[in-house]
Amino acid sequence: MKKTSLAFAAVASAMALVLTGCGGSGGGASTAAVDAAKFKTATSAADVGGMDALVAAAKAEGTINVIALPDDWANYGQIKKEFAAKYGIKVNSILPDASSKEEIDAADKNKGTTNAPDVFDLGAAVTLASTDRFAPYKVAAFDKIPAGNKEATGLWVNDYTGIMSVGYNATKFGEITSLDQLTDPKFKGQVAFNGKPAEAGAAFNGFLMVNNANGGTLDNLQPGIDWVKKLKAAGSLNLADVTAGTIDAGQHGVVFDWSYNQVATTTRLKAKGVDWKVFVPAKGEIASYYNQAVSKDAPHPAAARLFEEYLYSAAGQNAWVKGGASPILFAQMKADGTLDAAAAANLPVVAGTPQTPTSAQATAANAFLKANWDAAVA
Amino acid sequence: MTQQSLPATAGPRSRDAAPSASRPRRGWLPLLGTVPFFAYTAIFLLLPTVLVLVGAFRSREGAFTTNGITQALSERTLGIFVNSLWVSALTALVGAVLGAIIAYALVTAPFGSLGRRVFTAFMSVVAQFGGVMLAFAFIATFGINGMLTRLLRQWAGFEVDPGMLSTLAGVALVYCYFQIPLMVIVFLPALEGLRPQWREATANLGGTARTYWTRVAGPILLPSFLGSYLLLFANSFSAFATAAALISQQTIIVPMEIESALRNENDLGMDAYAQALALGMIIVVALVMWGYARLSRRASRWTA
């Protein structure tokens, strides 16, 4: 789901998957073969005789393949670990740095092998374009999710969103409250987006944030481009790839990214005595849900469905909160009293109403960025 | 990056010695030995090329399309190709010239001496040092908080531009780090092939050092030099990871645009475009290989 590292490494691992996939057989599936079909088409836990039956079948499968879930993205490291511990199922994390599109490509390429991904976590554009790869499934909490946040038959469901934010080294730069401060000479070569806006979701939404904060709208992106040019002219923009390493080494002192990606940085830098703070610029409040979907060709259909049940349980939702994300059942859990209040208190303060581009706005914005971004930062 | 075929040592000499007609016919058995080679070539060279060719005309849904090619011929994409060609040509030139000078210096050291062996070994290692590691090494040295940047600031009051490494010129500078040593190791055998007797003969016939270099050694070395240049060019043209780590928020060279098109999560319809770009790269590399083959055929004349 994110864009940071090396496509060639990704391609190489994808090829390795294809190659090993050829030799793989449906390990451990022989006894459950009769039931396998039942789980492949199950649209709820009730379909297969309730949660206990689902858990038993998932345990028999023994493994789940998740894809594009980096440990430091929205607290997925903890989620994978806790799911594995709770059910005794091996979580096989494929291509953690893949993009949403690469998740679908990996599913297509590894179709029919035991290495195909079981579940997806996808950005909006890829989700809507790939529904023919999903199996409808309704988690226990499905009815509590607002209608606008799910596909009616359960093909996909919103899972969590962050708020686009500015993370910065407060120890070095002091308090930052406005984007305008970033053209100050002390930020020379320090400011970065998380990838190319015309390619990666995080960078795309980062651009929308600076655009809206500078008087633009989701339909008018010129103010954003103008501001980026100003930032570039001031010498503040750093085009190098943002990684934990470059942040720790002081190469990147200000990073535009989802709130749930800033949390890992804050925790990591605190241990080194550095205060990594996060703020959301006024009027630049941008949110965008990621979506969960079960693969139609999941090699571990029961484990895939159990993973979804876990994500939409209080434990799964609170894990996201702890990671700086705002899960879809946030309001519901607050009302029910199941929300981890301490973790929720750490979420960034958002003054305005977060905006999300519609599908048409996103397409138009992407075309605009494709045409104008490279020239703006050159 | 490869140096399995050194330009000056690749000679087809043995071929003439074995006319196949005079051999007793053993059928398929001798051919069996070539199977690994041809299988390898088919899987890693031929198959990908065919896949790229087909993919360049195939939409994500599997229908025929020329969108990819059309996009690849847009002004923006051609600009990216120009960047790629420019940075490759420049770093290959810098690498070839400096590398040749260093290689010559190395040849003047006694063959098998400790200094020469150590230096050659060092060059072989450095020539293979690339990718993200190299990018990070440069960032740690010349980046905003780099060691050298801080030393220069403290002692000389000189401020290194923090964005320097994330420009085309910065990438070119970093590429020279592996281009120069690569030139040294591929050009060394050609220089070793120069016989002292040729120099002596030139002197005996009244030639000066200048005559020797312009009339004897120069023409002999030229094909090897140009062949090495082309190798360096292809080496830099296909490099990706270093540039991608130095510049992630802008697309400047072709491999980065391919990566970007394959990964793009905002626009899924760019697969054919990515393949069309790869096709463009294949064409460029094919031309370079063709030139390289011609030159090494010329070069091999002198190594008998």
Image: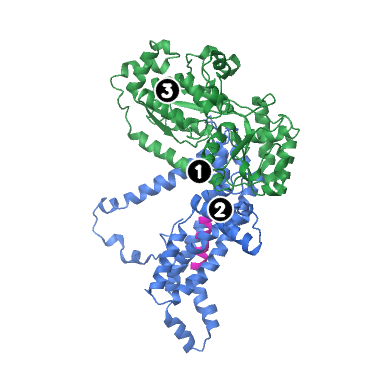
Chain colours: A green, B blue
Residue situated in front as seen by the camera: B184 or A121 = A121
- How many C-alpha atoms fall within 10 Å of the one at disc 2: few (<14), some, or many (≥20)? many
Which secondary structure, mark 2?
Answer: helix
Earlier along the polypeptide chain: callout 3 or callout 1?
1
In the rendered structure, which segment of residues is drawn in magenta? Answer: B224-236
Q: Which of marks 1 and 2 is in front?
A: 2
Residue B33 is left or right of residue A248, and the answer is left
Label 1 to label 2, Cα distance in Å? 17 Å
* Res. A304 mark: 3
Residue situated in front as seen by the camera: A215 or A82 = A82
Residue at image position (54%, 54%) is B140
Say what amino acid the circle numbered 1 marks.
Leu
Residue B62 is left or right of residue A186, and the answer is left
Residue situated in front as seen by the camera: B165 or A14 = B165
Q: x%, y% of residue A213?
A: 72, 33
Residue A287 magenta: no
**Relative to A321, does residue B3 appear above or below in the rendering?**
below
Residue B228 magenta: yes
Q: x%, y% of residue B178?
A: 50, 59
Q: Residue furthest front?
A: A273
Residue situated in front as seen by the camera: B201 or B170 = B170
Q: Name the residue under label 2.
A: B139
Badge 3 and badge 1 in a common chain = yes
Q: Name the residue under label 1.
A: A6
Label 3 to label 1, Cα distance in Å? 27 Å
The chain containing the residue under callout 2 comes to B
Q: Do the residues labelled 3 and 1 touch (CB within 8 Å)?
A: no
Which secondary structure, mark 3?
Answer: helix
